Amino acid sequence: MIETGRKVFCRTRNWKRFPLVRSPVGIHATIRSKSTSASASGYNDNTYQENADGKEFRYSLDKETHFGFETVSEAEKAHKVKSVFENVADRYDVMNDCMSAGVHRIWKDIFVHRINPGSKTRMIDVAGGTGDIAFRFLKFQRASASDPFRVGSPISVLDPRVELPPEQPRAENEAEAQYQAIGSQSQSNSAENEEVTSRSVLVSDINPRMLEVGQKRALTALSANEQKRIDWLEADAENLASIPDDSFDIYTIAFGIRNCVHIENVIHEAYRVLKPGGRFMCLEFSHVPNSLLRWVYDQYSFQVIPAMGQVIAGDWDSYKYLVESIRKFPSQDEFKSLIQEAGFRFVSYENLTFGVTAIHSGYKI
């Protein structure tokens, strides 16, 4: 259970009966899960946790994993990753613009366009502290509500495929199309009171500094009504213990899953919190298959990005880690297999910018 003066989440399968406390303004309104600690005194604060079943969940001090190209314990990686994003939080968006020449904005636009949310879609955005995906989701949702027959989007010039209306999401095959139709019908038939329906998106992040940046950005990036439809939760992507099963229609994680200690745990948690018929969507840096383009990309990544991080954010090491972490992340097909092993069906991926990033999608059936 999470508490901010009163009960917010209760362990029940019916999330709609226990809506979140709204936190549209002050940074102190952030909801903190008991699975994370406010302590910043070393990596033991992330070592002992409780999972959704009430069983002990642990980042081991003995088991080894990778932190970029460095070998560390699981607990040490959790602490180091937290430190990285605390260091870069204030300059995170500026660095993204500089490193990608603004292309990350197009990737995120395409990502939300692929989600294609309806006016009643409920989404959790994990590792989404600065709000980029959540803000786009809310604006897309508003556009869908105001014009249900709207076709395409401003990014369609980058996508030669025919765009479909929001109520007819693109399907990779006939079976998926039928399944999406069933899911859409069940969403439209569900009885939701006005109070709960107004809350469209929950932004979750393990790092309070990233959430603080996102909440400050929301004050200028969102309208007053949109601010009322977004909530913020401090929680570990591997351990969303405060969120009941079958709570959301969409689960998104963008440029965050590669920083987690156990990728497979993140995917299993995504499966748990999604409703039957829900969709898992991940946008992440991936692997460029073309050898020549990969060489150019590697030269830019290792020679330019850390130096840019030093000049703009005063932090070489954090951006060196971010570059290295991309190389340690599974390939497109390997990641697809992990998603399938968690129980998702109709799993597919789409490369963007020659495979620099990829969108993976799967459905909970």
Image: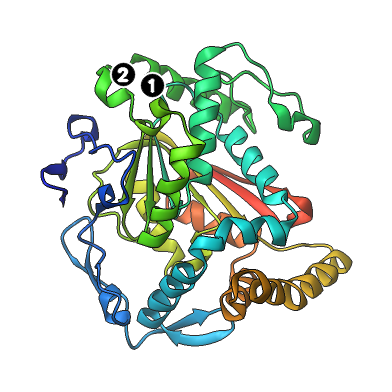
The structure residue drawn at horizontal position 48% and vertical position 73%, both measured from the top left corner, is 84
**Which one is nearer the viewer's eye here, 327 or 310?**
310
For residue 146, say whether it is visible: yes
Residue shown at the point (62%, 29%) measured from the top left: 171
> Going by the picture, which residue comes out furthest to the left?
6
Which residue is identified by label 2? Answer: 190
Residue 310 point in image, percent of width and height: 65, 76
Q: Amino acid at mark 2?
A: Ser
Element at label 1: helix
Numbered label tally: 2
Disc 2 secondary structure class: loop
Q: Are marks 1 and 2 in contact (CB under 8 Å)?
A: yes
Can you tell which quarter of the image residue 347 is in? Answer: top right
Instruction: Estimate the spatial distance between the alpha carbons at disc 1 and disc 2, rounded to whole Å.
Output: 5 Å
Instruction: Give neighbour class at mark 2: few <14, some 14-19, many 20+ (Cα, 10 Å).
Output: few
Q: Quadrant of residue 21?
A: top left
Mark number, residue 187: 1
Residue placed furthest toward the right: 292
Please state which amino acid type lies under the numbered disc 1: Gln
Which percent across, then down, holds residue 91? 56, 62
Q: Is residue 327 above or below residue 359?
A: below
Front residue of this view, candidates 334 and 224 = 224
Q: Nearer the viewer, residue 194 or 208?
A: 208
Residue 221 point in image, percent of width and height: 51, 37
